[in-house]
């Protein structure tokens, strides 16, 4: 039996597939796209003894700090940042939140058991998430490269386009991790649907479909490039853009072309 991606998402949320198992196997790399050597806490070794083998999954203390800005580089004050991490308990994925100050700066501390991102092979300390009015949803996994991490987040305002029009979308690591079932770097746009009908989407470079770029809708139940789907009337219909595995890591600006036929 084949489960749809939407069903998989529900099962993950209910904990029926294990905590974060699909996220960690199939989703994002950190926004920078780099793989760093995991931080491994070690103590002094007795004279003449052999240093123990590094354990990238050792339970460790982390302090994460940084600045949150908008796409113009201006600090974003008084917004919440959620960190989800493996606490090692019966229900391992635990959230902890903090808030940016007047300068957009934040600091948060937690104990975490890092896990391996199966796309990159790097150890991850936590998943950062920011949902705040006026900006697009932001999320990204943080590499466990040391006990003190500096992680800056750049938020962007939503990209909105009316059905039948086109809009430029940057697929960039600065957008954070992918919000759909695809490979980074990614982006997102919102399409205004005036009535029930059929929507066609295409990620273009010039007059041709962008090679390696994938479009997703309905939480991953529909994907392709181009993509034609039946849609209901909606003030904002979410479209996620990213890459196939073979094209991951390519930052580019594409043109999201839409066409619409009402029922």
Image (cartoon, grey):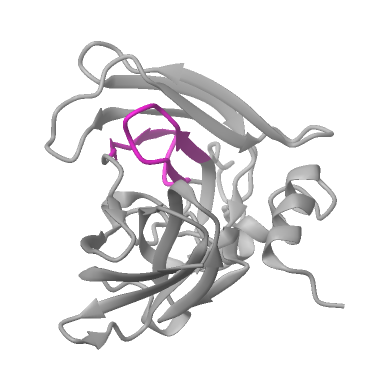
Q: Residue shown at 47%/37% (left/top)?
A: 128
Q: Position of residue 195 (x, y in %)?
A: 47, 55
Above-or-below relation of 250 to 195: below
| Residue situated in front as seen by the camera: 86 or 239 | 239
Q: Residue shown at 45%/44% (left/top)?
A: 139
Quadrant the N terminus occupies: bottom right
Q: Which picture quadrant has residue 189?
A: bottom left
Q: Which picture quadrant has residue 213?
A: bottom left
Above-or-below relation of 208 to 158: below
Does residue 121 appear in this view?
Answer: no
Q: Residue shown at 39%/65% (left/top)?
A: 241
Q: Can residue 164 be found in the magenta stretch?
A: no
Q: Position of residue 66 (x, y in %)?
A: 29, 29
Side of 237 relative to 58 (left or right): left
Magenta-colored span: 127-155
Side of 77 relative to 228 (left or right): left
| Residue situated in front as seen by the camera: 205 or 182 | 205
């Amino acid at each position: 039996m084949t489960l749809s991606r939407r069903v998989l998402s529900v099962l993950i949320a209910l904990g029926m597939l294990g905590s974060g198992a699909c996220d960690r196997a199939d989703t994002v790399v950190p926004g920078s796209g780099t793989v760093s050597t995991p931080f491994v806490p070690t103590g002094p070794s007795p004279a003449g003894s052999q240093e123990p083998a590094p354990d990238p999954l050792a339970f460790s203390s982390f302090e994460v700090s940084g600045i949150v800005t908008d796409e113009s580089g201006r600090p974003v004050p008084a917004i919440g940042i959620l960190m989800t991490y493996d606490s090692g308990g019966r229900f391992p994925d635990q959230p902890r939140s903090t808030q940016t100050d007047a300068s957009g700066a934040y600091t948060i501390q937690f104990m975490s058991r890092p896990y391996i991102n199966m796309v990159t092979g790097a150890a991850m300390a936590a998943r950062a998430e920011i949902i705040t009015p006026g900006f697009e949803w932001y999320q990204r996994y943080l590499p466990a490269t040391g006990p003190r991490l500096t992680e800056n987040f750049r938020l962007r305002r939503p990209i909105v386009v009316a059905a039948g029009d086109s809009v430029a979308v940057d697929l960039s690591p600065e957008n954070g991790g992918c919000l759909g079932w695809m490979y980074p770097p990614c982006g997102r746009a919102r399409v205004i649907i005036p009535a029930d009908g059929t929507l066609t989407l295409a990620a273009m470079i010039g007059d041709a479909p962008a090679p390696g770029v994938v479009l997703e809708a309905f939480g991953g139940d529909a994907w392709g490039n181009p993509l034609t789907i039946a849609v209901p009337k909606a003030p904002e219909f979410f479209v996620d853009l990213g890459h196939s595995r073979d094209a991951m890591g390519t930052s580019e600006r594409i043109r999201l072309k839409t066409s619409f036929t009402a029922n």
